[in-house]
Amino acid sequence: MKRKKVPMRMCIGCKEMKPKNELIRIVRTTDNKIEIDSTGKKSGRGAYLCKNDKCIEASMRENKLSKALDFHVTKEMVLKIKEELLNS
């Protein structure tokens, strides 16, 4: 019996490859809103982050989220995302 291939994605904070289901997807929708994609299937440009505080801080500090989403992400947006991630 064949084993199903596990999709791997890279965290933009720590640059580690991890299984897709261990990461959180942040997506820029077609109407330029930044959202957390809990399903992993929303349309738009996405970036993946680990569920820990260090990776979120690294992506904010080095402006990696803005580069990955090809959109200027403000500090307020990042803080809102960080709050949602840590509360969930």
Image (cartoon, grey):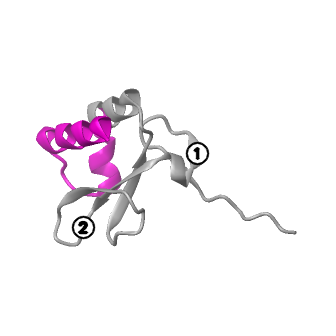
Majority secondary structure in the magenta region = helix
Quadrant location, the N terminus: bottom right
How crowded pointer 1 is (Cα within 10 Å; few <14, some 14-19, many 20+) is rated as some
Numbered circle sitting on residue 29? 2
Looking at the image, residue 74 lies above or below residue 35: above
Q: Residue at x 54, y 54 (%)?
A: 20
Q: Residue at x 32, y 41 (%)?
A: 88
Relative side of 4 to 68, left or right: right
Disc 2 element:
loop
Looking at the image, residue 63 lies above or below residue 8: above
Q: Which residues are magenta?
A: 62-88
Q: Residue at x 39, y 27 (%)?
A: 54
Disc 1 element:
strand
Q: Which residue bears the numbered disc 1? A: 18
**Mark 1 / mark 2, whichever is N-terminal:** 1
How far apart are the two marked residues, 1 and 2, measured between alpha carbons?
24 Å
Specify whether residue 67 is painted magenta: yes
Residue 74 position, x and y percent, is 14, 44
**Callout 2, which amino acid?**
Thr
Residue 71 position, x and y percent, is 22, 56
Relative side of 18 to 72, left or right: right
